[in-house]
Image: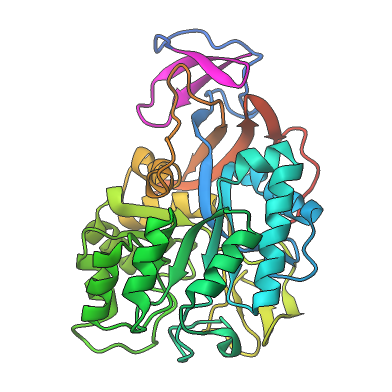
Amino acid sequence: MQQVARRYDTGQLVRLEIDDGRIVQCQPLDAGAEVPPETNNRAASPMPCWVAPGWFDIQVNGYGGQEFSSLQLTPEKVADIVRLHQQFGVVRVCPTLTTESFDVLSHGMRTIAQAIEQFDDVRRMVPGIHLEGPYFSKEDGPRGAHPAEHCRRPNWDEFSRLQDAADGHIVLLTMSPEFDEAPDFIARAVASGVTVAIGHTGATSDQISAAVDAGASLSTHLGNGAHRMLRRHPNYLWDQLAEDRLMASLIVDGQHLPPEVVKTFVRAKTPERCILVSDVSGLAGLPAGRYPSSGCELEILPDGRLVIAGQDQLLAGASRPITTGIVNVMRMAEVGLRSAVDMATKHPMALLGISAGGLRPGDAADLVFFQLKHGADGLVQEMQIVATLLAGQPVYDYRAAEPTLG
C-alpha cells in the first residue's frame, strides 16, 4: 500500500509505503512531483492530505448514548464506542470511568477488560483505562457533575479490587490530593505502575506540592472541575500551572475554557507539557434535549454544550471530539500544526510511558489523513478527517463512511 501525503511536522510531501501494519518507508518527494490519482486526496482539493500519527484521547467517557460507567455496558458496546471514535482520527483511547458506586465501577472495569480480550481492534486501541474519581471532595464546584453521594476518600483496598476487576488495565487515576492519606495513596499507586493525576480538587498549595512529591504527574482538564470563584492568590490553578513536574490536559472544545485562558495555560505550561483531551460524555453524538443520568438530569443545548439540566453554565462533560481541540488550540494559543498534533499524540503517549509512534520506517501504521480549511484570517478553521488507518488497514474513510452519530 502506498500513499502520498504531507507530513504534519514538516509540511514535506512524502510517499508512504505500508506493509504488514507498519511503515516500510517514508520517502520525501520533490515539491513539483506528480501526485498519482489513486492517492487519498479529497476530490474537491488538488492538494494531498496531511498525514500524522493517529490521535490518542486519554479521557473518553462514552459516546452515542452509552457511558462506560454503566451497569448496561457490554463488551460489544465497548467495541462500538471505541470504533465510533475512529471517524475523528482516534487510534488510541483510554475508556474513562467516572465517580460511581463500587458495583458500577467494577462492572465497567470487568466489561472493558473482556472487550480488550475479545476484540483485536479494541486491544490495539485501548492501552488502558482511566479512572476519574471516585476519590474527590463532595464540595460543590470542585466535584463538578460527579455525584456527591459517591465521592469518597482514597481507599487502597477498594482501588486494588477495581484494578483486579480491570485485569490490571487501569493505567491512569485522577483524584483530589486534599485528603490526609492522599500522598501515601499516590506513592503506592505510582509504584504499582499507575499514572496519577490531580483533578476535581480544592486542595491547598501544600497538598498539591505533597501530591507531586509523591508522584502525581498530570493535572486533569486544568481549569475545569473547580470553584466558580477563586481567591486571587494563592490558589490551586496557579499552583498547578507553576509546577513543572505536572503536565496538563486541556479541554479545548470552545466551551470549557475561554480562548484567553487556553492561550495563558499553554504559554505557562509550554506546549510540550500540554495534552489535549475531549472528555466526551456518553451523551455526545445525540441531538439536543434532556436526558436522564445518574444523580441528575443532563441537557444538550442547541449549541452542543452538555450541562446539568435547567441552566446553561454548569458543564457536565463535553460533546465535541479531540479533533476540535487540535484546531482550536492552534487558533487560541497560536501554536503550529506540529505542536497541536503532538498534544494529541506524542504527549499522552509519553505521559503513560508508551513508545510514541511516528512516521519513521518501522513505526506502526496507525495513522490519520486529513485536510485543513483556513479562514479569512489565514488561521486553520476546520480539520476534515479523510481516513484513519489502524495497523495499516483503513478503519474510517470519509468517502465510504455511513452516517454516524455526531
- 126 shown above or below 315: above
- 265 shown above or below 122: below
The region drawn magenta spans 1-26
> Residue 71's image quarter?
bottom right
User: Which of 29/272 is in front?
Assistant: 272
**Furthest-front residue in this view:** 157
Residue at (45% x, 16% y) in the render: 361
Residue at (44% x, 57% y) in the render: 194
Residue 179 in percent (x, y) is at 37, 83
User: Which of 366/150 is in front?
Assistant: 150
> Residue 124's image quarter?
top right
- 24 shown above or below 267: above
User: Which of 64/103 is in front?
Assistant: 103
Q: Is residue 12 magenta?
A: yes
- Where's the C terminus, which quadrant? bottom right
Q: Is residue 403 visible?
A: yes
Q: Can residue 222 be seen in this view?
A: no
* Magenta region, main secondary structure: strand
Q: Across the whole image, how many numbered discs are drawn on residues?
A: 0
Query: In the drawing, does residue 170 fall left or right of residue 217?
Result: right
Residue 193 in percent (x, y) is at 43, 53
> Residue 230's image quarter?
bottom left
Residue 271 in percent (x, y) is at 29, 50
Residue 236 in percent (x, y) is at 28, 78
